[in-house]
Amino acid sequence: MSAFELKPGARPVVRGIASQASSDGAGVKIQRVAGFQSQDFSPFLMLDEIRSENADDYIAGFPPHPHRGIETLTYMLNGEFEHRDHLGNRGAVSSGGAQWMRAGRGIIHSEMPAQAQDGTAGGMHGFQLWINMAAANKMDKPTWRDIQAAEMPEVPLDDAGSLARLIAGEWTVAGEKKSAPLTDAAAEAAVADIRLAADAEVLLPLPEAHSVMVFVYSGALVTERGHIPRGNMLLYGAGETLQLRADHSGAGLLCLHGLPLREPIAHYGPFVMNSREEIDQALRDYNNGTLTDD
């Protein structure tokens, strides 16, 4: 394989961020990449990866908790999570499926992993993205839906087995415009699972006004900055296309693009608003039981 050379019009890598070990919910072990105060991240706020064969790392799950001002997208590669919320929604997604939730004004929900009937957990590998909502929409009515694996379009990228699984937003893949099952995410947010065969290279046209990020979840990418192993997020600069090349081990990637909001962000726990006063109001609403009121 020749040395990596950035093609004309391709977006350069401007920054890399290594995921950090953390925990959330009832002690679930995660790897986190956070960018709440980075305009380079917008409209995305955070990516959590759950990856473990040890049930003790995740089986306690995420008991009931509130959110306001964001959307979340949960995508599973392996394992199963069940969602329940105060609106009466209930649904589970397993390997290859996704759940989307618009918290808007306020939602109280839980996300709990499912165990096999024999009591074993079978391992868990999945992601949750936090997507910011524009100030004008943060108090919208909350909604939720699940997207089962069979609903996800899979688009071949080459003859070697590379493919794109389209989860959210609009994409141009293999010269054709494609829509993912979820097209109404905030700020035109788009998410795809790109799986590249060994040494494969693809070019994806993306809207020039959008920010672009790629999280490497398996294998490694070859870039103008060298080999990027799994567990790293790459932020890209301006350009017309996204150039992706796997190394000899192939690569599994979450590719993200969306329209930057360029609005102030105030963040406290599960709430993301535009000012400290709005955060204080969210806390008051939650504590007095009116967070979810219309």
Image (cartoon, rainbow, N blue to C red):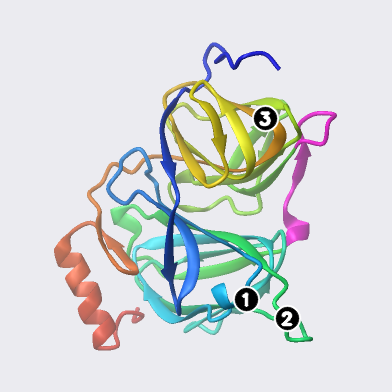
Indicate whether 67 appears above or below 14: below
Mark 3 highlights which residue? 247
| Residue 155, image x, y percentages | 76, 39
| Residue type, mark 2 in image | Thr
- Please give left or right for residue 113 compared with residue 19 in the image: right
Height in image: 65 above or below 274?
below
Point 75% across, 81% down: residue: 116
| Residue position marked by numbered label 1 in the rendering | 55
What is the magenta range? 149-162
Disc on the earlier residue, 3 or 1: 1
Q: Is residue 261 magenta?
A: no
Q: Is residue 58 visible?
A: no
Q: Which residue is drawn at 31% across and 79% down?
A: 291
Quadrant where the C terminus is found in the figure: bottom left
- Secondary structure, mark 3, is strand
* Residue 204's disc number: none
What separation in Å lies between label 2 and label 1 (alpha carbons)? 8 Å
Circles 2 and 1: CB distance less than 8 Å? yes
Residue located at (46% from left, 22% from top): 12
Residue 52: horizontal and vertical position, in percent?
61, 65
Residue 22 point in image, percent of width and height: 42, 63
Whole-angstrom CA distance, mark 3 to mark 1, is 31 Å
Residue located beneath label 2 in the image: 120
Instruction: Tell me which label, 2 or 1, sits earlier in the chain.
Output: 1
Taking the magenta stretch, the answer to whether it contains residue 160 is yes
Mark 3 residue type: Asp
In the displayed image of the protein, which residue is found farthest to the right? 159
